[in-house]
Amino acid sequence: MNEVIRKIDQITDNEKLVAILELVISKLEINTISEMARLENKSPNGINVSNNYKKIFIGKQKFAIKGVRDDKFPF
């Protein structure tokens, strides 16, 4: 795992980085906090405080990733 992260860290071509990001996103159930709340029949605040979703920022937008606990990250 660390070797993969190191290799990605060395990439400077933005098009390659975007391709990697698109691949990763296609493998995860990732949505905005509001959309995840709607899909899960929960409130946005409920998603925000839950440890059942890893929360990340992409730019200024906060996203929730289902299936990755927020209290056991990284690895």
Image (cartoon, rainbow, N blue to C red):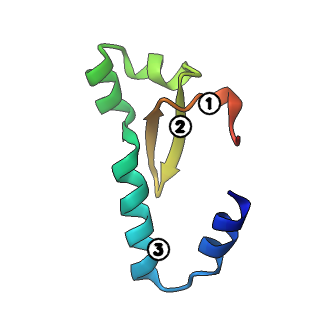
Please provide percent x and percent y for residue 73.
68, 37
Label 1 with label 2: CB-CB less than 8 Å: yes
The image quarter containing residue 70 is top right
Residue for point 69% across, 30% down:
72
Q: Quadrant of the N terminus?
A: bottom right
Q: Quadrant of the C terminus?
A: top right
Label whose residue precedes the other's in the sequence (1 or 2): 2
Label whose residue precedes the other's in the sequence (2 or 3): 3
Determine which residue is flagged by label 1.
70
Q: Alpha carbon of mark 2 to alpha carbon of mark 3: how far?
A: 21 Å
Q: Which mark is residue 54?
A: none
Badge 3 local density, few (<14 within 10 Å), some, or many (20+)? some
Please provide percent x and percent y for residue 22.
36, 61
Q: Alpha carbon of mark 1 to alpha carbon of mark 3: how far?
A: 24 Å
Please provide percent x and percent y for residue 71.
68, 27
Taking 12 as reference, is 26 left or right? Answer: left
Label whose residue precedes the other's in the sequence (1 or 3): 3
Residue for point 55% across, 85% down:
12
Q: Which amino acid is tagged 3?
A: Leu
Per the image, label 3 sits on a secondary structure element best described as: helix
Residue for point 55% across, 34% down:
54
Taking 62 as reference, is 3 left or right? Answer: right
Q: Count of labels shown?
A: 3
Picture layout, residue 10 above or below residue 74:
below
Determine which residue is flagged by label 3.
17
Q: Which amino acid is tagged 2?
A: Lys
Is 71 in front, or is 32? 71
Badge 2 local density, few (<14 within 10 Å), some, or many (20+)? many
Determine which residue is flagged by label 2.
55
Residue for point 72% across, 60% down:
2
Per the image, label 2 sits on a secondary structure element best described as: strand
